[in-house]
Amino acid sequence: MSLSYVVKGSKEKKAVIVPFEPPLSNYEEVRPRLLAMKLDAEEALGMVKRPKITTFEMSVDTFAMLPLIVLLIFVAYAEPKPYSTIYNIGPWLRNAVGGITVIRWICILASSIHALEAAYVFVLCRRHSTGLVVGAKWVAITFSMGYPGWARLRRLIQKARIESITKIH
């Protein structure tokens, strides 16, 4: 979409092209997209308050990382047992990836990534005035489960933003 404008105090006409990503497929998509862009601009300029998030909601997909976390703990701590095949899988996997040192580095890397994600969620919680208890829940679930935790919070923020757009207009 191309827009033309004139700056106050100047007679020079300027033009700007606004790309739409993803491209609009029909006319019905124009109004919601323009309203969302307007809200983004108003938030960036400090003209509109960010929507408050006052709930902590989890879904089944929040726990998508749980099997991997359990497997990592099992591989790290399982000791070989005679006459047991399930406990011998843990030490076998540990040796297959390079031993306990590699497992420790995987744990350190995963914890570091989760800590950064939790810090990002902390900033989101501050921006959207979640309060201490709700914010602590979001930070804790993100630190423990990673991406699914903060992705759920982002979806709630997006939903609240859309609701605030529809209430205004």
Image (tube, rainbow, N blue to C red):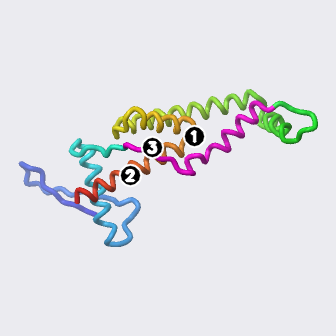
Look at the image and say whether residue 131 sits in the magenta stretch. Answer: no
Please give the range of residues in magenta. Answer: 54-78
Asked if the residue at tag 1 contacts the one at tag 3, i.e. Cβ–Cβ closer than 8 Å, the answer is no
The mark that comes first in sequence, 3 or 1, is: 3
Extreme residue toward the left, this view = 9
Quadrant assignment for the C terminus: bottom left
Mark closer to the observer (2, 3): 3
Disc number lying in front (3 or 1): 3
**Along the line of sight, the residue nearer the viewer: 54 or 15:** 54
Q: Which mark is residue 145?
A: 1
Q: Secondary structure at mark 2?
A: helix
Q: Quadrant of residue 76?
A: top right
Q: Which mark is residue 158?
A: 2
Task: Answer few, some or many: residues within 10 Å of disc 1's Cα (few below 14, many 20 plus, some between 14 and 19).
Answer: many
Kindly report the distance in space between the C-alpha atoms of the residues bearing marks 3 and 1.
Answer: 15 Å
Q: Residue at x 35, y 60 (%)?
A: 20
Crowding near the residue tagged with mark 3, few <14, some 14–19, many ≥20 C-alpha atoms within 10 Å: some
Q: Secondary structure at mark 3?
A: loop
Q: Quadrant of residue 32?
A: bottom left
Viewer-proximal residue among 11 and 22: 22
- Please, what is the three-letter code of the amino acid marked with disc 2? Gln
The local secondary structure at tag 1 comes to: helix
Residue drawn at (51%, 47%) of the image: 58
Q: Identify which residue is drawn at 26% across, 57% down.
A: 167
Q: Which residue is mark 3?
A: 56
Q: Measure the C-alpha gap from mark 2 to mark 3.
A: 15 Å
